[in-house]
Image (spheres, rainbow, N blue to C red):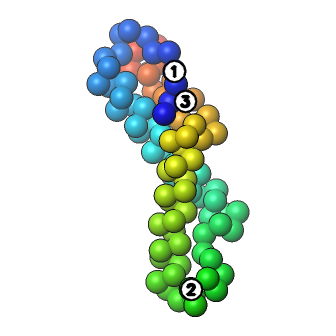
Amino acid sequence: MVQTVVPVSVPLQRQQALQQAAQQLEATFLAEMLESAGLGPARGGFGGGAGEAQFASFLVQAQAEAMAEAGGIGLAETLFNALAERDRGG
């Protein structure tokens, strides 16, 4: 969860939407980084094939979402603050 101090001028419902969007974007970024690091397809884990490659991407995405939810790398917080500032009109 993104831990930030938000100006009062941003409504709570909008804050929650911005937090969720920022966290989803961080998870997508982390998934791409994990795949680039070679954590995608399990080499020979289940005999290979197109199905294994497809399901490996689901695993990487789930791992990235868990990482982002646990605090991630701080990208979601930075994105959220930028979006909240934009919404505030600053």
Query: In this orientation, does residue 18 appear?
Result: yes
Residue at image location 60% in from the left, 41% down from the top? 72
Task: Residue lying at the far top in this picture: please name it.
Answer: 8
Residue at image location 47% in from the left, 74% down from the top? 55
Q: Nearer the viewer, mark 2 or mark 1?
A: 2
Residue at image location 55% in from the left, 40% down from the top? 70
Residue type at mark 1: give it: Thr
Q: Decide: is 85 above or below 21.
A: above
Q: Position of residue 4 (x, y in %)?
A: 51, 21
Q: Decide: is 47 above or below 38.
A: below
Residue type at mark 3: give it: Glu
Residue topped by disc 1: 4
Which of these two is toward me, 86 or 40? 40
Q: Decide: is 50 above or below 54.
A: below
Residue topped by disc 3: 77
What mark, if any, has residue 46 been given in the picture?
2
Q: Looking at the image, do the residues carrying marks 3 and 1 touch, with CB atoms under 8 Å apart?
A: yes
